[in-house]
Image (spheres, rainbow, N blue to C red):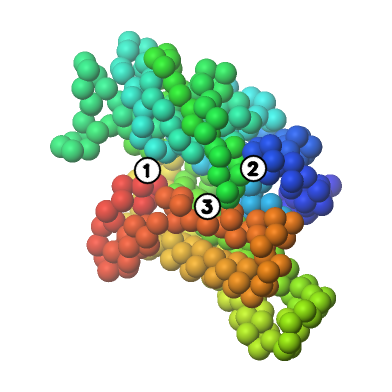
Amino acid sequence: MPGPLEVARNLLPLISRHREDTESQRRIAGPVLDALREARLCRGTVAADLGGLELGGVELLALYELLAGAEASVSWVVWNNGLPCFFSRFLRPEARAEIFANPGWLYACSTRPSGRAAVTDDGYRVSGRWSLVSGCELAEWIVLRCAIEENGAPRMLKPNVPEMRMVWVRRADVEILDTWHTGGLRGTGSHDVVLKDLAVPRRHTVSPLDGSTLDGVLGRVPIVCNMAAGYAAQLLGMGEAAIAELFALAGNKPVVDPGPALGERPAVLAAIAWHRTRLAAARGQLRTAVAKLWAEAAVGAAVGAPPAPGAGATIGEVYGAAHIAMADGRAAVDAAYNLAGASSLYTSSPLERAHRDLHAMTAHVIAQPNYLEDAGRVQLGLAPVNPLFLV
């Protein structure tokens, strides 16, 4: 029976055939979505006993890289499903079983703290509007970040630190606003969602402060740095695909101007060799760091225990490797786009799509320098500033 990576590789022709449908419909094309559900590729970070693939860290990177080389919107939605699946470790087991009862269900989330959850006797009343909720139209459950309110005021964990929780709600209970009109990542359907005074039981809310209730590696491995690594893997996949397209053009693009053909130009020849090597080096560094992180989690502390002293060192290595990979992926796409000349201008060109998608991806919070700055702080023996650095 083929493994998840082989299944994903076999889906690449289908994904490519429906690229224009994904683009024009601003959501994953129906046949591709059906195939993702059947293969459970959006459940890579879900335990096997809940219908998940329970992939290891390096396998996840390979999956995201493979899909991104064919269609960034597909890899983006698959990757985004990883965060709510990871965060389900903080649910009580019975709630987790409820939320993952159907192996065909997909998930979406927003970590923007733009909601309010007022305390009630048995849970919360939730209101708010969240933007950039990728794949919200496709999801059965949507996870949204809220500030907790009690007696009409924010409840504080300590001075200037409000209590925040993630709430799990059904897609049928949210209003989806058609706001995703963009150039890049158009197929992700990253619309705004709205809730108005929805009752949410406490069992459907989580905070990392609750502690994990899931044993095994998935219950212990740090979450946010794995998301950064998965983001970076997508850029590596896009970079590889862009250089491959430049390589193909170098072999067959007609000569229309005086001077050497594309495949004879020194800048093109050097770029192909340079970026292929840079991408390979970044991939190796990223996978090595992630493999180390998961190996440490496999023999880590008991469920619910705080991170071990020094745990931030390996986390910092993952963030550092991720940001190197991000930079090399971006550089490869930009170089291929620029060196291909007028061919890159047409929407029929994979380079045109990759260029748009790549620059949309750079707006994501995971690509911002604050995580890398905290990696430097940890290397100096200082505490990270970002409270999510160790999560």
The x, y position of residue 283, in whole percent, is: 59, 68
Q: Quadrant of residue 209?
A: top left
Where does residue 243 sit, x and y in percent of width and height?
68, 71
| Residue position for label 1 | 305
Give the camera-side residue of 354 and 297.
354
Residues under numbered marks 1 and 3 in contact, where contact means CB atoms less than 8 Å apart? no
Residue located 32% across and 32% down the image: 164
Kindly identify the amino acid type of the residue bearing the numbered disc 2: Gly
* Label 1 vs label 3, nearer the camera: 3
Residue 345 in the image: above or below residue 112: below
Helix, strand or loop under label 2: helix
Disc number placed over residue 147 in the picture, else none: none
Which mark, by number, is residue 360?
A: 3
The residue shown at (67%, 34%) is 51
Q: Which residue is mark 2?
A: 187
Q: Residue at x 66, y 82 (%)?
A: 268
In this rendering, position of residue 35 left or right of residue 186:
right
The mark nearer the N terminus, 1 or 3, is: 1
Residue reaching furthest to the front:
257
Q: Amino acid at mark 3?
A: Ala
Identify the element where label 1 is drawn. Answer: loop
Residue at 21% in and 31% down: 156
**Mark 1–mark 2 contact, CB under 8 Å?**
no
**Relative height, residue 245 to residue 192 (above, below):** below
Tell me whether circle 2 and circle 3 mark residues in contact (CB < 8 Å).
no
Q: Is residue 316 left or right of residue 103?
A: left
